Amino acid sequence: MTSSNPSASYFAQVAGQWDALRAGYFTEAVRESAFAKAYLHPSMAAADVGAGTGFIAAGLAPLVQHVHVIDGSSEMIAIARKNLTAFDNVTFHTADGLSLPLPDGSLDAVFANMYLHHCPDPLASIREMARLLKPGGRLVITDMDSHQHKWLKTEMADLWLGFERSQVRAWFEQAGLVNIVVDCTGQSCQSECKSDGGEQADISIFVATGTKRMKRHEAVQASYATQAQGGCGCGDGSCCSPGTISIDEVSMVDWVAGYSAAEKAEIPAEAAEISLGCGNPIAMANLKAGEVVLDIGSGGGIDVFLAARRVGPTGFVYGVDMTPAMLQRARRTAQKGGYNNVKFRHGYAEKLPLKDNLVDVIISNCVINLSEDKGKVFQEAFRVLRNGGRLEVNDTVFGGPLPPAVRDSLSGWSECISGALPEQEYVDLVRQAGFQDVQVRRSTSAGISEGVPIYSVQVSAVKKEKSS
């Protein structure tokens, strides 16, 4: 809480009984849901904002290097000190929630559990918490869904009757966060009104996560412009070892694109020689004659030209890429090869230059990991697909939490490693965009980064109209 918060006097009064009260409202399962979405690493520094008596911090301290426990109630902080005496990696702060006592960009993760509905200005509170995050750091908020139990305002000093998840998502976006997931925890907050006949409240609890931008766009674009002009790439035919990537902070990773000799023979050589992917989306896409296809991050055009063969003269394939040099190369190849059913457009995966409901199939090969806001990419993919349309993408993912030092590598981003997400987070973002029937298949590309498995996956999903 904050010292100027109307809820402050309530928490000063109940501090001594809060642990018993809290246990009746919600359980440790809420805390575990928050941790599962944070992808914590032992090297991280984190904060528990609106910490109360240290419920989140007690579970967090064994998992990370350091925890800052922050609350506006000195009475709550006093109890938290007693509860957390077993940990020597905890620092306590009595501070206003709108003026948190830590520098900009100092933390890898910030948690706030059942705090937001006590904040007079939730957006300002979210912005202040986001301020503390390092680039790539995560904000994790657990709180109540919108409800109508108005007595909680008087009996428990709640300022808000929970929140609509769409509003929480909008606040995260306004705070500059990306890869936003607002999901259910499967848990609920339970309470009983002391008046009005003892009305029971059983309110579902959401978990919201968002990530601070790292601003890697320009470095990635420059790297791919070099590759388009014949510089060192990371795929077949590049000046690196074929299919092998090596960068400073990351161990060796082998990417196997999986194109057959027959597939390479059916398209122009200049397209086949600049394969920068980590799989073969065409192999799983089951393209049919007459379909309209979009390749996000089309590069030199290998997948566009393969798709054009599959959909035939009655179909059409769009290639969208952010790198002018790549587009020039692909357009020259298309003209030379006489491809009349393809078009290459300049654009970004987060803002596709195509109309709504235009395409039947979207493919992408080891490109979405290069975007910082993968959630926005999948929302755009959903927008341009027709009802019943299919998403078929290959991409790199991690099998666990990534050390922050690897995430920060500029070269690692352009090598399709540092921008990769944990597999579950990647799938969560596909589902959050509205896709259904999401399936994940692991491919043969794999390696290790700082002891964490990294591999490529084929993700398939379908756009379906919501039932009325």
Image: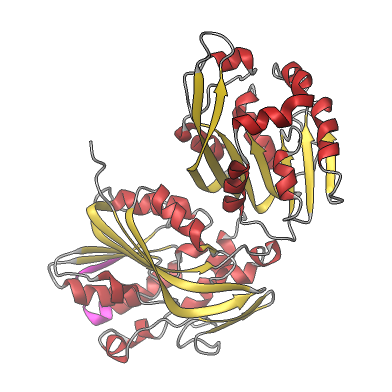
Q: Is residue 19 left or right of residue 80?
A: left
Q: In which image quadrant can residue 7 be found? A: top right
Q: Is residue 296 left or right of residue 218?
A: left
The range drawn in magenta is 335-343
* Foreground residue among 320 and 35: 35
* Residue drawn at (61%, 48%) of the image: 32
Counting from the top left corner in percent of width and height, residue 146 is at 48, 26
Q: Is residue 341 magenta?
A: yes
User: Is residue 156 something one can see in this rendering?
Assistant: yes
Which residue is most to the top?
A: 196
Confirm whether residue 365 shows in the render.
Answer: no
Q: Position of residue 441 (x, y in %)?
A: 39, 70
Front residue of this view, candidates 412 and 284: 284
At horizontal 54% and vertical 41% (from top left) the residue drawn is 207
Residue 238 point in image, percent of width and height? 50, 86
Q: Reply above or below: 373 against 328.
A: above
Task: Determine the residue positioned at 53% across, 71% down.
Answer: 416
Please determine whether, in this image, residue 383 is positioned above or below residue 129. below
Confirm whether the magenta stretch covers residue 14: no
- Tell which of 250 and 241 is nearer to you: 250
Q: Quadrant of the C terminus?
A: top left
Q: Quadrant of the N terminus?
A: top right
